[in-house]
Amino acid sequence: MTSAFAAAGYDLQCFDGWDLAFGPERLIEDAATANGPALAANLRSAEGAPLFYRATCWSRNRISNGMNYTVQRAGRTIGFFALASTGHYAHAADMSADDLVQTASEQVAALTAQGAQAIVCVAGPDTDLSRVYTDLQKLGITAVVSALETECFTKNGLNVIGVGGGLEGVGTFELVFDAAGGVGVENPAVHPAATLEGNRGALDADALAVYESALDSLEVLSAGDAAVAGQTLFTFEENTDARKTLSFGNFVAEVWLAYADGDRDNWQDMAPNLGDLTLTAVAGGVSELEYGDVTRGALLAALPAGARVQLVKTTAEAVSQLLDTGEVSETYADAQVPYEAEGSALLVTDTNTLKLLSDQNYTVLRDYGDAFWDIRMNINDRTNAFAEPFVLPEAPTYGAGRGQG
């Protein structure tokens, strides 16, 4: 997106974990086209190495191509910083509420040292700040620009500008400084595409030329995204020798369970009684793949977009309610028997599915990275880096609901 930002005359670009959907190579290529300063938050490769790093950054312990930056406008200094996104790779570090506040406080301190009179936090679509709005307001942050939200609102005294609608809902706001040195947010709004298109007629010739240049750049980038999405990742074949295979939804749930099982020593150390709780894995928002060549775009579409995989502590009642919605797939073996847990329970699933829990009564224990990349890499490992066809595993030969054949 950076060439379009440059064509439109923007002073600042912001990279986020979401931009890794097409892989680090594309992201780094985009960064190379950036005109001027850019923000990047905690973007790491699968090996944990920072994708962007500048040795002159104020803190060498932070990933950055500039994690924060100041812009001068009307004699005022406005600071921006990017927060928290860990990227679309498995094993990305979980950002707890304490982590978010600590990182934000460091960025605020750095921007304050640079003379920032207003500070704007930019958060990507995989960063939920709802648990730390009060903390961010206490740190003196003026506004949050959130790609997770699609509306503007005020929460605990903090102005949140939703830009999750992309070009279909562009968020804007004004910073107003008073004589006493205070700053406020005025006219926060999300403008639908129809409004923006209607406003084109009011542009003068120079502004329209810039707009048309940016539009051309976006169309080129969109075509590039479509080309990447159309690339074949692997071949999906039916297992004709097996009497019965798992569904793709069952397979995804099995992968989530494997993540939690493989991490059992870590989460059991967090509390002595966690190991005694029933662990359930479910996959939501999963559609079945078509046999044949599977493209990156098709795999993205078959999985919950932008969701992360998390292990949470919740109640057995909440898990039962989730299963009763009929919108999730369990591991095959668990799906054959009634769910009968009581009291507390453990659940591993994606963050989109967690939103189905009506009362949000859960505590996040572990984060296993982005859903798309978790499945992509699992299939990569099963197919010798996609060199061999992918077939769904067989369902268990024995077990409740199955004959012995």
Image (cartoon, grey):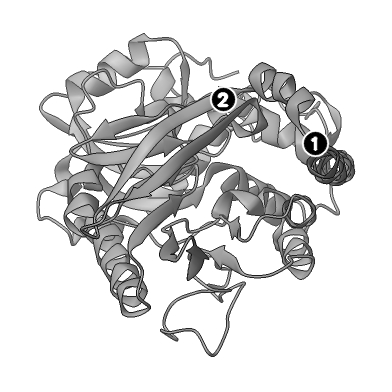
**x and y, in percent, of residue 301 in the image:** 69, 29
The answer to whether residue 170 is above or below residue 69 is above
Q: According to the image, label 1 marks what residue? A: 204
The answer to whether residue 186 is above or below residue 69 is above
**x and y, in percent, of residue 168 in the image:** 64, 25
Disc 2 on helix, strand or loop?
A: strand
Judging depth in this view, the residue of 282 and 199 nearest the camera is 199
Q: Quadrant of the C terminus?
A: top right
User: Which kind of residue does numbered mark 1 sit on?
Assistant: Asp
**x and y, in percent, of residue 163 in the image:** 52, 36
Residue lying farthest to the front in this orientation? 179
Residue displayed at 19% across by 29% down: 361
Q: Could you tell whether 83 is left or right of 404 in the image?
A: left
Asked whether the viewer can see residue 265, the reply is no
Residue lying farthest to the bottom in this orientation? 55
Judging depth in this view, the residue of 113 and 283 nearest the camera is 113
Using a 10 Å C-alpha cutoff, classify the residue at mark 2 as few (fewer than 14 neighbours), some (14 to 19) or many (20 or more).
Answer: some
Judging depth in this view, the residue of 314 and 381 nearest the camera is 314
Asked whether the viewer can see residue 119, the reply is yes
The answer to whether residue 109 is above or below residue 349 is below
Residue 191 numbered mark, or none: 2
Q: Earlier in the sequence, mark 2 or mark 1?
A: 2
User: Which kind of residue does numbered mark 2 sit on?
Assistant: His
Residue displayed at 50% across by 66% down: 72
